[in-house]
Amino acid sequence: MNILQFKTNIKCTGCISKASPVLDEKLGEGQWEVDLMTLKKTLTVTNPDVSEAQVVEIVKEAGFTAEPLS
């Protein structure tokens, strides 16, 4: 399984509500999640059909930022 992780500024449930329509459409419902319980607010994407660059652009389209974690 292809698992990609990103540092993001999606930091609260309101942010997730705002980003969800775009991320669900482009990444697939259930193919992504943001861990709001950590300070890093990590976005994890499990969709095998997207690259890191595509995720960064999709998150940007949703109005937020994503930076790949090494």
Image (cartoon, rainbow, N blue to C red):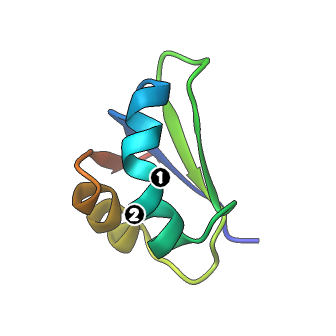
Crowding near pointer 1: few (<14 within 10 Å), some, many (20+)?
Answer: some
**Which residue appears farthest toward the right when viewing the image?**
1
Residue at image mark 2: 22
- Vertical relation: 35 (above or below) 51: above
Check disc 2 and give the amino acid type. Val
Check disc 1 and give the amino acid type. Ser
Please tell me how many numbered marks the rendered image carries. 2
Q: In which quarter of the image is the N terminus?
A: bottom right
How much space separates mark 1 and mark 2, taking CA atoms? 6 Å
**Which residue appears farthest toward the bottom when viewing the image?**
49
- What element does badge 2 sit on? helix
- The x and y percentages for residue 10 are 38, 35
- What element does badge 1 sit on? helix
Q: Do the residues labelled 1 and 2 touch (CB within 8 Å)?
A: yes
Q: Which residue is drawn at 45% across and 41% down?
A: 17
Which mark is drawn over residue 43? none
Q: Residue at x 57, y 84 (%)?
A: 49
- Vertical relation: 46 (above or below) 39: below
The residue nearer to you, when weighing 5 against 12, is 12
Q: Which residue is drawn at 63% across and 72% down?
A: 47
Residue at image mark 1: 20
Left or right: residue 30 versus residue 37 is: right
Q: In which quarter of the image is residue 26?
A: bottom left
